[in-house]
Amino acid sequence: MTMNRVARLVKRPAPGLVTPECFEIADEAVPEPGDGEFRVRAEYVSLDPAMRGWINEGKSYVPPVSLGEVMRAFSAGTVEASRHPDFKEGDQVVGLFGVQTHAISDGTRVQKVDPEIAPLQSWIGGLGMPGLTAYFGLLRVGAAKEGDTVVVSAASGAVGSLVGQIAKLKGCRAVGIAGGPEKCRALIEEDGFDAAVDYKAGDLGAQLDAACPNGIDVDFENVGGDILDAILPRMNPFGRIAVCGLISAYTATSLPPGPKNIRFVLTMRLKMQGFIVFDFAEDNATALADLGQWVKAGKLRLREDVREGGVDAFVDTLNLLYTGGNFGKLSLKV
């Protein structure tokens, strides 16, 4: 008998990495769709840095996942039963279906995807939230233009690798910050970055000076902490900082100090803006058209890190995001 394998949040995590006792993973009856609903058989669950914040209690851009609730997650799968006029059996879809093998939806914020453009898992990656985040963060918030020097931290991750590639498509100099020589090599040789900085190698400031001889016009910030502090003094006047994430603090056991070099926001007249990809939802179709065209033309490489293990591997796989264990868009095959 087919069952729904599901991960439910049962305990708020302590500071640090997420531990297995925070979730109950169990088999439940496969739900049946009602009128105006359909059931999805999930195939890939997206693992995103924001998940660590979603399970904390406190004020944020979305309410926290409630105790007892299925863990919030974007996933991609196939409609296997439908009582909805706009979705039929066999449709491949992406939505906020949660960490489970089967989900019921009424179609709200669900997107049908085209497997002829890219395989299913890519629609929760470069053609999903990470791709939209890179697109809007760089082009709208960062206002990157031809000739700019763009620096992106966590550049080997799902968003960062796309930021650098889009920057190159727009005529910018792309500089990525990543951990380790292999990731830095891949940024240049496979993703087309102009330069890569290895934050694990030390002398971060000197490396940035060498990679950015004309200063930095746009910082796509995914990390914060010491990396942001090294970038701030090297920003050009009227530079733009698009704050996408601050992953260095997500699993910190104590609150890290604020930026020591914040004065450069004043002296260089910088624009520093946080953003959430949902801010631009009304323009998703335009962004996806551009992203899809670049992928189909071979101009945009989608770096994917798909892990096996099903729902049971959720916690261990999620923690890879906070230890640098992934290389590209991290997803879990369920």
Image (tube, rainbow, N blue to C red):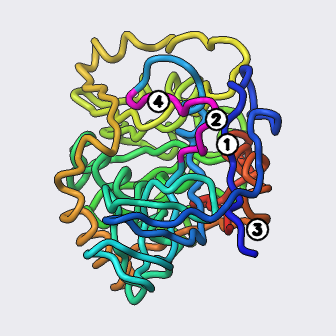
Task: Say whether disc 2 or disc 4 marks the residue closer to the N-terminus.
Answer: 2
Instruction: Report whether 237 appears left or right of 113.
Output: left
Q: Does 30 sit above or below residue 99?
A: below
Give the crowd class for mark 4: few <14, some 14-19, many >=20 residues within 10 Å.
Answer: many
Residue furthest to the bottom in view is 116
Q: Does 23 sit above or below residue 85?
A: above
- Give the alpha-carbon distance from disc 2 to disc 3, as whole Å: 25 Å
Q: For mark 3, what is the residue?
A: 308
Residue 251 got which mark? none
- Label 3 is placed on what type of residue? Glu
Q: Tell me which segment is drawn in magenta.
A: 61-72
- Label 4 is placed on what type of residue? Ile
For the residues bearing labels 2 and 4, Cβ distance under 8 angstroms: no
Task: Say whether disc 3 or disc 1 marks the residue closer to the N-terminus.
Answer: 1
Give the crowd class for mark 3: few <14, some 14-19, many >=20 residues within 10 Å.
Answer: some
Q: Quadrant of the C terminus?
A: bottom right
- Give the alpha-carbon distance from disc 1 to disc 4, as whole Å: 39 Å
Residue 8 got which mark? 1
Q: Does 289 sit above or below residue 270?
A: below
Q: Does 59 sit above or below residue 147?
A: above
Would residue 160 be visible to someone looking at this image? yes
- Give the alpha-carbon distance from disc 2 to disc 4, as whole Å: 41 Å
x and y, in percent, of residue 67 in the image: 62, 30
Residue 231 got which mark? 4
- The residue at 56%/20% (across/down) is 57
x and y, in percent, of residue 270 in the image: 26, 24
- Label 1 is placed on what type of residue? Arg
- Label 2 is placed on what type of residue? Gly
Q: For mark 2, what is the residue?
A: 68
Please identify, in this view, whether the residue under mark 2 or under mark 3 is nearer the observer.
2
- Give the alpha-carbon distance from disc 2 to disc 1, as whole Å: 6 Å
